[in-house]
Amino acid sequence: MKYLFYKFGYLKALFSPFKPFGLKWYFGKVAIGTPYFLPRKWVKSENGQISVPKKVGFDVVGLGWKIKWSDDDFRFEWAPLISFVFFGYQIAVMVEAPEEYQYWEAWLYYELRTDKSKSQSERIKECKEKFPLTYTSGDGTETNYYNLVLKEQYQ
């Protein structure tokens, strides 16, 4: 079950108070990492294993995130994607969310730390109180990213 959440749990965002994410397509020579390196596989060698580029392969990459300084300090690392490689060419479908870092970090807090027995509106209120997304730039401009990542009725 944990494996499925890792690979596909991000799809729950589509049915949440967060704006729906989009998809970005790539067709061309292999250029999209899965997540950090180009698609590759490990093969045996005299000294252990080495990585070699995939000639044909399929990769499903889940949402990449970690917890940094406390149990509620979520950090976005990479967006989910699906990649198919065929003899030096790649088709990749990447998830593209608005304000990507703030979107996924707030969604993770919403999904993993708010009380699921409450309504979506109450859970968003809890997010705004305990996981604020208001930032002030150097010129004093204040931005509340919840206004950019939530559906209008939840802002």
Image: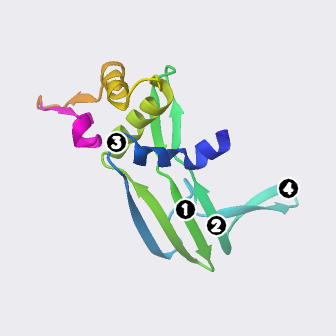
State the image coordinates of residue 102 (x, y, percent, origin top left): 34, 38
Q: Secondary structure at mark 3?
A: loop
Counting residues from the N terminus, which is met first, the one under dot 2 or under dot 3? 3
Residue 47 - label: 4
In the displayed structure, 154 sits above or below 60; it is above
Residue 31 visible to an observer of this rendering: no
Q: Tell me, yes or no, whether the highlighted magenta stretch contains residue 147.
A: yes
| Of the two numbered discs 2 and 3 in the rendering, the one whose residue sits closer to the viewer | 3
Q: Which residues are magenta?
A: 141-155
44 vs 19, left or right, is right
Between 95 and 114, the one lying in front of the other is: 114
| First-in-chain label (3 vs 4) | 3
C-beta proximity under 8 Å, tags 1 and 2: yes
- Mark 4 or mark 1, whichever is nearer to me: 1
Residue displayed at 29% across by 40% down: 150
Q: Residue at x 11, y 32 (%)?
A: 139
The numbered mark at residue 58 is 2
Q: Could you say whether the residue bearing mark 4 is in a helix, strand or loop?
A: loop
Which residue in the structure is indicated by mark 3? 18
Q: Residues within 10 Å of mark 1 (few under 14, many from 20)?
A: some
Front residue of 61 and 44: 61
Res. 98 visible in picture: yes
Tell me the kind of residue under disc 4.
Asn
Residue 94 image point, x, y percent? 45, 60
Which image quarter: residue 109? top left
Q: Quadrant of residue 23?
A: bottom left
Is residue 97 shown in magenta?
no
SS for callout 1 = strand
Q: Residue at x 34, y 39 (%)?
A: 17
